[in-house]
């Protein structure tokens, strides 16, 4: 019994010291050189600053990423939309990328707080009204903005977006772990051990992209680098834990809307998008055959074309 207890203590000590020792001796850690480039910083009040990409001229379009993600994931879509004649603003939501980190208070890292941040960003950029494009969790953010401030939204695009019916879906085991009180600590430890980090990150990407050969070259290391930025995993865990969809009322959103969803989206099932389309009063559903949850990365030209067409309505 004593021997078992001793080895248990030794194992716990090794688990605790492995990451810092690995970093010190072997240089463990993500490759910072493959991170998305930093854009420009804009103050939105409350001591918070948002990092954003702001390119092009014409009717403004805001691109709101999911979790965990960053503005850099929109790169191809940004270029296509700017070429089509739009001012395109893609930004790191608070807690991600190069944007500020905030205190983990109960009113932070929620759909509501993100909607407030987006409206504050529009004010800071002196943009009264714009098309809002939300991807995954970001789709929930823009839905809330359209509910509480419809006068600020010209058009709404929901890409693989969350919706009220997602709450009824069976959660993935990883989602349960991330949303637990120990989620942030577990994620941080796994991220600090490169072999485990690469395996888990790549496995998550296979599910996100629906198949392994759809993952762009170098995307696993790029994802590890962005997740390795300070505070990102804490933000991810908090948003998963506070993922409350009860306040969503799509039937109240009257602006022209597009629901763009991949047929093979394994993170937010197509049925969620179909339900959103039925409940939105002025919506069109566009299903991408064999499309995954990662349409802005795998189909940037198609995504930009669909957004542009909607804004012509």
Image (spheres, rainbow, N blue to C red):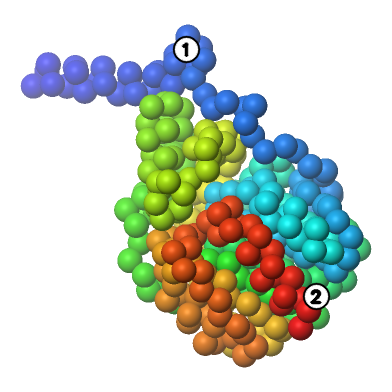
Q: Badge 2: few (under 14), some or many (20 or more) residues near its Cα, within 10 Å?
A: some
Point 38% across, 43% down: residue: 203
Residue 5 appears in view: yes
Q: Nearer the viewer, residue 190 or 73?
A: 73
Q: Earlier in the sequence, mark 2 or mark 1?
A: 1
Q: x%, y% of residue 25?
A: 47, 9
Residue 12 to residue 44: above or below: above
Q: CA distance from mark 2 to mark 1?
A: 51 Å
Residue 128 to residue 242: above or below: below
Q: Nearer the viewer, residue 45 or 130?
A: 130
Image disc number at residue 264 = none
Point 78% across, 49% down: residue: 53
Image disc number at residue 26 = 1
Residue furthest top as drawn: 25
Q: Nearer the viewer, residue 272 or 243?
A: 272
Residue identifier under label 2: 152
Question: Where, quadrant-wise, is the N terminus in this rendering?
Answer: top left
Q: x%, y% of residue 172?
A: 34, 57
Mark 2 near mark 1, Cβ–Cβ under 8 Å?
no
Point 71% across, 84% down: residue: 255
Q: x%, y% of residue 116?
A: 72, 64
Q: Secondary structure at mark 2?
A: helix
Residue 110 appears in view: no
Point 26% across, 17% down: residue: 10
Q: x%, y% of residue 86?
A: 83, 64
Question: Where, quadrant-wise, is the C terminus in this rendering?
Answer: bottom right
């Amino acid at each position: 019994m004593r021997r078992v207890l001793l080895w248990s203590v030794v194992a716990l000590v090794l688990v605790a010291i492995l990451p810092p020792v690995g970093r010190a001796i072997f240089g463990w850690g993500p490759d910072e050189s493959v991170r998305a480039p930093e854009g420009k910083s804009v103050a939105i009040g409350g001591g918070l600053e948002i990092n954003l990409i702001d390119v092009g001229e014409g009717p403004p379009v805001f691109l709101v990423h999911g979790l965990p993600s960053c503005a850099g994931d929109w790169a191809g879509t940004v270029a296509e939309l700017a070429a089509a004649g739009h001012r395109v603003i893609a930004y790191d939501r608070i807690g991600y990328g190069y944007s500020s980190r905030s205190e983990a208070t109960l009113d932070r890292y929620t759909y509501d707080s993100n909607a407030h941040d987006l409206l504050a960003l529009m004010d800071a950029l002196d943009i009264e009204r714009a098309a809002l494009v939300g991807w995954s969790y970001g789709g929930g953010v823009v839905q809330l903005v359209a509910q509480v401030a419809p006068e600020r939204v010209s058009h709404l695009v929901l890409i693989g977006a969350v919706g009220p019916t997602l709450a009824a879906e069976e959660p993935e085991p990883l989602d349960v772990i991330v949303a637990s009180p120990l989620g942030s600590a577990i994620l941080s430890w796994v991220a600090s051990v490169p072999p485990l980090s690469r395996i888990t990150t790549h496995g998550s990407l296979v599910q996100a992209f629906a198949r392994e050969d759809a993952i762009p070259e170098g995307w696993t290391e790029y994802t590890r680098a962005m997740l390795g930025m300070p505070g990102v995993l804490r933000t991810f865990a908090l948003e998963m834990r506070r993922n409350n969809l009860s306040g969503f009322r799509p039937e109240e959103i009257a602006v022209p809307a597009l629901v763009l969803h991949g047929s093979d989206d394994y993170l937010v099932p197509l049925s969620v998008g179909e339900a959103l389309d039925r409940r939105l009063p002025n919506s069109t559903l566009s299903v991408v055959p064999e499309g995954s949850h990662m349409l802005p990365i795998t189909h940037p030209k198609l995504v930009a074309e669909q957004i542009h067409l909607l804004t012509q309505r």
